[in-house]
């Protein structure tokens, strides 16, 4: 069986990644990708991490706990609705929540008031259509010191009918922004839900 076939089989397994939890909070993520995220946080020790599209907040809680071990950092979650975010997440002292569309100028300004530009980490996991993802990248790369992760760039592998999505947004962004390159860190795990979306700032 090829790596691509394993990838598709894992993605379509209804009792798999979509049922994962962290500390009891639903966290529909590929565990190998979360593992890479904690490696980056530990290595880079960013003063903040911004995540768009938080659902119940399981990944926010995961990042906050890693930052507890690092000893610093805010975790800023943005979503159009925060009603699903669990109390355990809301109550963590490192977590800040902003309700609204991640591409609204007012939301971006709220983020800017919370953090200094250009010294943190960003991961994008909200609306996966190309136009929205590209607007997110253009709005949030200003806050990135080293890593920006565009999630679910694998949609063309597992859902070819989806149409232009995250990977097309990444391709267009990189054509017009030479400050970032793709990072191949995920390849040691053979596949990633964000393959092609792990971006590293080089200038």
Image: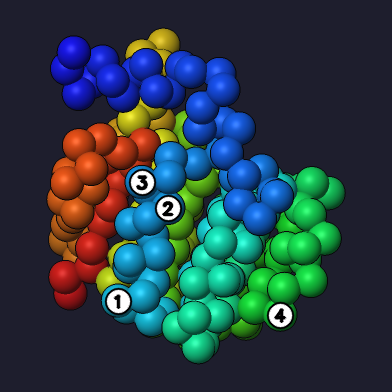
Q: Kindly report the distance in space between the C-alpha atoms of the residues bearing marks 2 and 4.
A: 21 Å
| Of callouts 1 and 3, the N-terminal one | 3
| Of callouts 2 and 4, the N-terminal one | 2
Q: Kindly report the distance in space between the C-alpha atoms of the residues bearing marks 2 and 1.
A: 14 Å
Say which residue label 2 marks: 34
Residue 118: name its quadrant. bottom left
Is residue 8 left or right of 23 when viewed as pictured? left
Is residue 177 left or right of 142 when viewed as pictured? left
Q: Kindly report the distance in space between the C-alpha atoms of the residues bearing marks 3 and 4.
A: 26 Å
Across and down, in percent, residue 21 comes to 62, 44
| Of callouts 3 and 4, the N-terminal one | 3
Is residue 88 left or right of 186 when viewed as pictured? right
Helix, strand or loop at label 2? It is helix
Coloration of the structure image? rainbow
Residue placed at 34% from the left, 30% from the top? 154
Please tell me the numbered disc located at residue 32: 3
Kindly report which numbered mark, 3 or 4, lies closer to the viewer in this rendering.
3
């Amino acid at each position: 069986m090829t790596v691509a076939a394993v990838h598709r089989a894992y993605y379509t397994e209804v009792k798999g990644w979509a049922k994962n939890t962290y500390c009891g909070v639903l966290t529909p993520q590929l565990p190998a990708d979360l593992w890479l995220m904690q490696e980056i946080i530990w290595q880079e020790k960013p003063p903040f991490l911004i995540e768009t599209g938080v659902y119940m907040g399981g990944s926010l809680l995961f990042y906050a706990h890693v930052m507890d071990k690092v000893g610093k950092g805010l975790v800023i979650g943005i979503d159009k609705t925060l009603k699903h975010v669990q109390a355990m997440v809301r109550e963590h002292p490192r977590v800040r929540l902003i309700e609204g569309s991640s591409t609204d100028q007012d939301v971006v300004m709220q983020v800017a008031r919370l953090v200094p530009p250009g010294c943190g980490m960003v991961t994008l996991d909200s609306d996966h259509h190309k136009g929205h993802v590209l607007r997110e990248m253009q709005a949030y790369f200003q806050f990135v010191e080293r890593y920006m992760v565009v999630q679910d760039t694998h949609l063309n592998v597992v859902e070819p009918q989806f149409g232009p999505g995250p990977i097309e947004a990444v391709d267009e962004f990189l054509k017009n922004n030479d400050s970032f390159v793709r990072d191949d860190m995920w390849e040691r795990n053979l596949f990633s839900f964000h393959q092609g979306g792990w971006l590293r700032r080089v200038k």
